[in-house]
Image: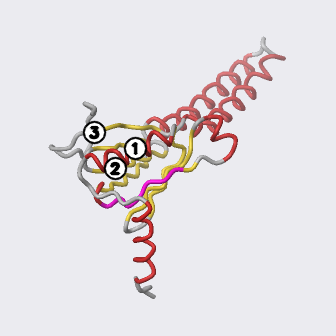
Amino acid sequence: MSDTKFDGQHDDETVVNVYRRHPVVMRKGLLWLLVFWVAGLLPYSFWFYTEWAKWLLAAGLLAGGVVMFWSWMGWFFSLIIISDQRLVQVTQEGLFRRTVVDIGLEKILSVNYQIAGIEQTALGFGTIVVQTYVGDLVLEYIHHPVSVQETLVKTIKDNGFNYSGQEGQEMAAEAAKTTPNKK
C-alpha cells in the first residue's frame, strides 16, 4: 500500500500503486528536439562569428526545448492509479487537455496484456486491456505490463471483488449478443 494521494480520492480509499506510461511515448518529442537543435547548430557551425547564426542557434535550442517539454508533460502527468476501490487512468495531452477514466474494481471482468513485436519486447512495454461490462479500457505503452496486470488482478481479488477472468470474457460476449442494437 502507498501513501500517495490524488485529486478525487475517496476518504476511505487507499492507493495500491501508481504507474506511468513507458518513456518511449516521448520519442517524437525527442526526435523534434534533435531536429531543431541540428537546424540551429548547422548554420552556427559554419558562420559562428555572425550575430544571426547565434540567434538561429538560440531559436533552435528554444524550439526544441518547447517541443520536448510538451512531450514530457504528456508523459509525466499521464498516470494509471490502482486503488483498493477503482482503477483510474489519467491522460494528459499538452497543457490544457486532461482525460480521466474511472472504473470501479467490481466492474472489471478480465485484465489481459499484450507485448507485440521486437520494440516492445526489447524495451519492456506493452498494452493492457481491461474488459468491463460496458466495454474495454485499453492502456497503451505500459511499462512492465505483466507486473501491472498481476497487481491489478491481485488487488481485485484481495478486496473481495469477484474476478472471473476468462469466464468474465465469455459473459460479456454473451451479453453483447443479447443486447439489442439501437438504430
Picture coordinates of residue 18 (x, y %)?
37, 37
Foreground of the two, 124 or 23: 124
Q: Residue at x 41, y 58 (%)?
A: 165
Q: Position of residue 47 (x, y in %)?
A: 82, 16
Q: Badge 3: few (under 14), some or many (20 or more) residues near its Cα, within 10 Å?
A: some
Q: Residues in magenta?
A: 107-113
Residue 80 circle label: 1
Q: Residue furthest left?
A: 11
**Image point 31% across, 45% down: which residue?**
155
**Disc 2: CA contacts within 10 A as few (<14), some (14-19) or many (>=20):** some
Q: Is residue 31 left or right of residue 19?
A: right
Q: As shown in the figure, which amino acid type bears the numbered disc 1?
A: Ile
Numbered tag placed on residue 70 in the rendering: none
Q: Horizontal and vertical percent for residue 16?
A: 30, 38
> What's the residue at 64%, 32% (across, down)?
30
Cβ–Cβ below 8 Å for labels 2 and 1? yes
Q: CA distance from mark 2 to mark 1?
A: 7 Å
The residue carrying mark 3 is 15
- Confirm or deny contact between disc 1 and disc 3 (CB under 8 A): no
| Sooner in the amino-acid sequence: mark 2 or mark 1 | 1
Give the Cα distance between marks 3 and 2. 10 Å
Nearer to me, 116 or 10? 116
Where disc 3 sits, the SS reads: strand
Disc 2, SS: strand
Q: Which residue is mark 2?
A: 87
Position above or below: 88 against 43: below
For the residue labelled by badge 1, is the local secondary structure a helix, a strand or a loop?
strand
Is 112 in the magenta? yes
Q: Give the Cα separation between the discs numbered 1 and 3.
A: 11 Å
